[in-house]
Image: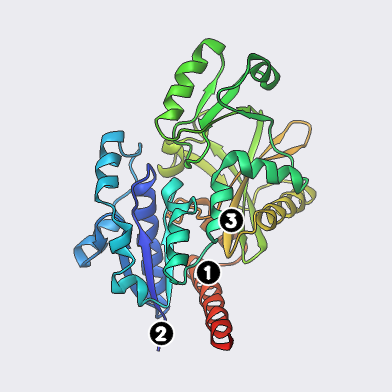
Amino acid sequence: MSARVTILTGGSTPERDVALAGAGQVVHALRERGYRVTVVDTVTGPLDDAGERRLTTPVGKAPPTAVELEMLRRQERWSALVEKPALHEADLVFPVLHGRQGEGGAVQAILELADIPFAGSDQLGSAVAMDKDMAKRLFRLADVPTAAWSLWPATDKSVAHLGLPLVVKPSRVGSTVGLTVVHNLEDLPAAVADALMYDDQVILERYIDGREYTVGVLNGKALAVGEIIPQHAVFDYECKYTPGMTQEIFPAEIPETLTRHLQHLAAAVHMALKLRDYSRVDFRVAADGTAYCLEVNTLPGLTSTSLFPQSAQAAGIDFGDMCDRICRAGLQRAAREQSRHAGE
């Protein structure tokens, strides 16, 4: 009998629309491979056929407003959600979620406590990766270069050390939401205020002038390196989720030595943060050839324009095979856990 997989998606984070669009892709891919798939929105609950059809709606140019997000958060009831048969009767839950509540460890902790097997990284890896300050500390311990940074509030000396331009962003939010590149110090307070709308922890980071690359990691193995060339100065929300706004080259047209170096660093990051199943690691390479790790995504986007599927495709793994491999890794882990419990 085919495995029962529940896609857990939606959420109440700024990346809600991205998650829903990705879920639509995963649902189709897994059903084509014989999985029995159910879809659950963490806000509205299990989706019927009409709800699933809405998953094909394109991601907008901007995230939901703060008012919309607050309304979503008020509807989200995790204690009731984990009791639904769609979750606790599933062989595997496949989270297609983004943002702090989605991939920051809270969802993973709830699933672990409810003894519900799920794909992707566990609570610890998810939380550490989402917290950019903690992640960057682990990058350094793993000898992976990363741009100098400081948490807000920062002293004048710290800001001077970082220099201008300066990247200001929420520490525990993805998709470049709330990010500003500050060119003048008088603009710093406004940039911090914008970031604080999305997280109470704000990070200031030295701007790395260079070319941007990304590397997918699947079951511990680095996939193809891709180069990202956005139309805007920053690879922002609009460029990430609007077709045609970014040139994405897979595999990147770079020397083999740089390809292998970025793949080595991506695999090292995945291991250092104790991640599982899959991740995507982003870099900037400066003019002197130094590769700086920007961040790691434990639940990378799975929309039609997302980078992780392109990294897999360039490595010879199509979207359906990629989803299948993620599910198989989760199902095998669940079987091992069940076997261990039976032997206790």
Give the labeled residue for mark 3.
125
Q: Is residue 243 visible?
A: no
Q: Amino acid at mark 3?
A: Gly
Sequence order check, earlier mark of 1 and 2: 2
Q: Amino acid at mark 2?
A: Ser
- Label 1 Cα neighbours within 10 Å, binned few <14 / some 14-19 / many ≥20: some
Q: Estimate how packed mark 2 is, as few (under 14), some (14 to 19) or many (20 or more) residues with alpha carbons within 10 Å.
A: few
Local secondary structure at mark 2:
loop
Ranked by sequence position, the earlier of labels 2 and 3 is 2
Q: How has the structure been colored for display?
A: rainbow
Give the amino acid type for the residue marked by disc 1 in the picture: Ile
- The quadrant of the image that shows the N terminus is bottom left
Q: Which residue is mark 1?
A: 326
Query: What is the crowding at mark 3: few (fewer than 14 residues within 10 Å), some, or many (at least 20)?
Result: many
Q: Are marks 1 and 3 in contact (CB under 8 Å)?
A: no
Distance from disc 1 to disc 3, alpha carbons, whole Å, reads 16 Å
In three-dimensional space, the C-alpha distance between marks 2 and 3, rounded to whole angstroms, equals 29 Å
- Spot occupied by residue 133 in the image (x, y as percentages of width and height): 61, 38
